[in-house]
Image (cartoon, grey):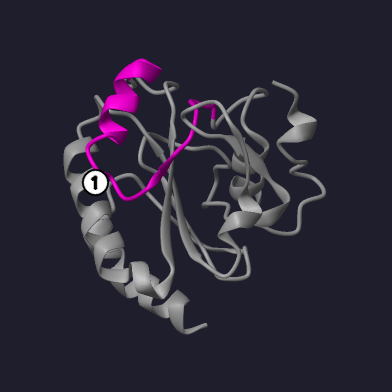
Amino acid sequence: MRNTELGDASKAESLYDFSAYNIEGKLVSLAKYREKVVVIVNVATKCIHAERHFKEFTDLVKKYKMKGLCILAFPCDQFGTQQDMVEEMKELVKDDRPFDFFAPIDVNGSSAHPLWQWLKKKTPTVGVNFIKWNFTKFIVDKNGHPAERLPPNTNPSEMETNLLRVFKN
């Protein structure tokens, strides 16, 4: 995979400057999410947070889809080998999950997807500029700018107030 087709973290101005491969292997421009509030999350099906997070993300999308909420799920196997194979992830997608699943990526290190390099740069946490674990969440506003970074232990249901604030802006 050539990073040039995915975007350049050092030159990007918004989410819309990136592309990513979806779970089916098709390159998708993230400009398709223009004027939407987007939650970007690294997921792993074997993570302790998986079942609850997938359910609560589903509930949030059902509640706020009309306001433009989209969830972009990026499988990642950089934390404790908690991600199933792509075929198993495709089975999960068939379960009527109302979010967009992308191909597995790295979120840390030199092979990190440019989008994730950019998100970390734009929303640094105190003392670290890396993703600590699966289910780190980024809320991106309707203009494609990161509004907030939330840790893995923040349940999606706890994000509702944060999302409402971003919808208003």
Compared across the picture, whether 134 is left or right of 56 comes to right
Query: Depth check: 151 or 97 in front?
Result: 97
Res 13 → quadrant: bottom right
Residue receiving disc 1: 53
- In magenta segment, residue 124: no
Q: Position of residue 40 (x, y in %)?
A: 47, 49
Q: What range of the chain is rendered magenta?
A: 84-106
Compared across the picture, whether 78 is left or right of 2 comes to left
Helix, strand or loop under label 1: helix
Q: Position of residue 31 (x, y in %)?
A: 65, 55
- Say which residue appears at 34% left-offset and 21% top-offset: 83
Q: Is residue 123 above or below residue 46?
A: below
Q: Is residue 155 visible?
A: no
Q: Position of residue 128 (x, y in %)?
A: 55, 42
Instruction: Assess disc 1: are there few (<14), some (14-19) or many (≥20) residues with their C-alpha within 10 Å of its C-alpha.
Output: many
Q: Is residue 18 above or below residue 94?
A: below
Q: Is residue 64 above or below residue 103?
A: below
Q: Is residue 105 above or below residue 145?
A: above
Query: Depth check: 167 or 89 in front?
Result: 89
Res 26 → quadrant: top right
Res 50 → quadrant: top left
Q: Amino acid at mark 1?
A: His
Q: Position of residue 117 (x, y in %)?
A: 65, 40
- In magenta segment, residue 88: yes
